Amino acid sequence: MVLQSLSGLPAFLAYFCVSAVAVIVYLLIYTRITPHDEFALIGKNVPGAAIALGLSLLGFALPVASAVAHAADIVDCAIWSLIAIFVQIVAYYVARIPVSDLSARIAAGELGAAIWLGLASLTAGLLSAASMSL
């Protein structure tokens, strides 16, 4: 019974590792394209930076989870994870359209700007995840 339960462990490890690498790649890319330094701001206890980055990460994780659930294989999952990165980058630039000084406002500790960016990222991720399930 235990061995039967563990028969899926190799696939779990493969998909989990691909997902973890995708998250790391996402954070590296996302934190490079934003003018503000999220991790430095979080280190200085700026809540808006944590809110915006955390919701953005969640917005990315949703489509990655959908890719894991619906992918034909590990390569398919990796490809859809890359697409999810692209969607989040687009979401960041779209969120800047109505709030052009978005990064400066987040760096200044303004929660409104951070919540706007975070929820825009989460929305993009949710729509992306739903679109991958077809």
Image (cartoon, rainbow, N blue to C red):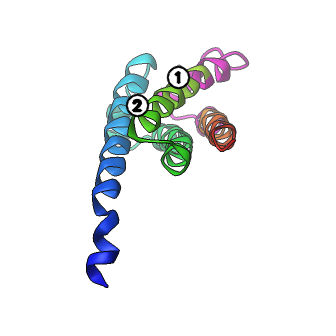
Specify the label residue 66 is tagged with. none
Q: Badge 1: how crowded within 10 Å, few (<14), some, or many (20+)?
A: some
Give the magenta-colored segment's residue range.
Answer: 91-116
Task: Determine the image quadrant of residue 27.
Answer: top left
Disc 2 target residue: 26
Counting from the top left corner in percent of width and height, residue 6 is at: 29, 71
Residue occupying the point 59% across, 38% down = 118
Residue occupying the point 62% across, 42% down = 129
Disc 1 target residue: 86
Q: CA distance from mark 2 to mark 1?
A: 9 Å
Q: Label the magenta part by its dominant secondary structure.
A: helix
Residue occupying the point 46% across, 29% down = 79
In the foreground, 44 or 65: 65
**Figure quadrant of the N terminus:** bottom left
Q: Residue lying farthest right?
A: 98
Q: Is residue 126 left or right of residue 77?
A: right
The amino acid type found where label 2 is placed reads: Tyr
